[in-house]
Structure formats: structure tokens, C-alpha cells
Image (cartoon, grey):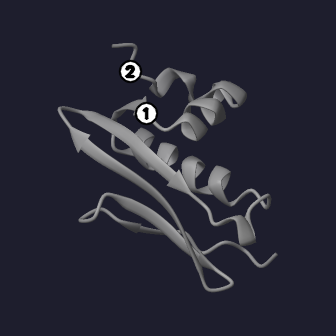
């Protein structure tokens, strides 16, 4: 797979990439110093390639740089954080 070109659209609350014509997205909202990850979506046609993980990693790295706490409402993002404890310090315990 070619390197993933992940783009950030903060005005839309979205990280996104196009893979073989398919839109892959991570949707979030920011309020009160918290980034709420709401949804991660990768079409089945391009699934299983680590795209969702790359989107979550990009979002978490951005949240860290922006000094935001993270609320992983999306089950995929929550699982990603459990599998990657280097991001556990970002999670808002509330």
C-alpha cells in the first residue's frame, strides 16, 4: 500500500484519507479542552490495512499537540488506545 495521505479538516472535525477511491474518516468534536472521537469509518473494500489505526493515531497525536484530553466514544478508538498504552495518558477519566 502507498503511504497514507491523512488530511485534517478541523473546521469539519474530521481526519480523512482517500484510498482507492474510498473515503476513510475519523470524526470528532472539541469542547471544553476535550476531543471526543465519535466515529471511525473505513469501507470494507479497503479494510484490514491499518487505515483506521492510522487515522486514530493521527487524531491522538494532534490531540496531544493541542493539549486536549480524549474521550473515545468510538469503540475502535477505545480499543486502539487499550492496545497502545502510549496514548493512555490522553484519556479523560470522566
- Disc nearer the start of the sequence (1/2): 1
Answer above or below: position of 37 versus 44: above
- Residue drawn at 70 percent across, 64 percent down: 44
Image check: 54 left or right of 23?
A: right
Is residue 47 visible in the rendered image? The answer is yes
Of the 4 image quadrants, the one containing the C terminus is top left
- Residue 55, percent across and down? 57, 56
- Residue 78 vertical placement versus 89 (above, below): below
Q: Position of residue 85 (x, y in %)?
A: 66, 24
Furthest toward the front, the residue is 44
Q: Residue at x 31, y 57 (%)?
A: 13
Near-viewer residue (48 or 62): 48
Q: Which mark is residue 92?
A: 2
Residue at the disc numbered 1: 73
Tell me: residue 31, above or below residue 8. above
Q: Which mark is residue 45?
A: none
Which residue is pictured at 49% across the width and 68% down the height?
16
Left or right: where does residue 72 sit relative to residue 11? Answer: right
Query: Count the marks: how many?
Result: 2
Q: Position of residue 54 (x, y in %)?
A: 64, 55
Residue 58 visible (yes or no): no
Local SS, label 2: loop
Q: Nearer the viewer, residue 58 or 66?
A: 58
Looking at the image, which is closer to me, 62 or 43? 43
The image quarter containing residue 19 is bottom right
* Residue at position x 40%, y 32% in the image: 70
Considering only vertical position in the picture, is 19 above or below 43?
below
**Quadrant placement of the N terminus:** bottom right
Residue 87 coordinates in the image, percent (x, y): 57, 30
Q: Residue furthest bottom?
A: 21
Amino acid at each position: 500500500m502507498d503511504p497514507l495521505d491523512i488530511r485534517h479538516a478541523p473546521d469539519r472535525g474530521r481526519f480523512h484519507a482517500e484510498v482507492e477511491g474510498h473515503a476513510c474518516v475519523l470524526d470528532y468534536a472539541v469542547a471544553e479542552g476535550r476531543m471526543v472521537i465519535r466515529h471511525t469509518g473505513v469501507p470494507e473494500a479497503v479494510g484490514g490495512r491499518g487505515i483506521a489505526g492510522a487515522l486514530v493515531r493521527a487524531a491522538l497525536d494532534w490531540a496531544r499537540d493541542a493539549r486536549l484530553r480524549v474521550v473515545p466514544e468510538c469503540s475502535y478508538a477505545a480499543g486502539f488506545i487499550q492496545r497502545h498504552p502510549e496514548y493512555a495518558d490522553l484519556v479523560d477519566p470522566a
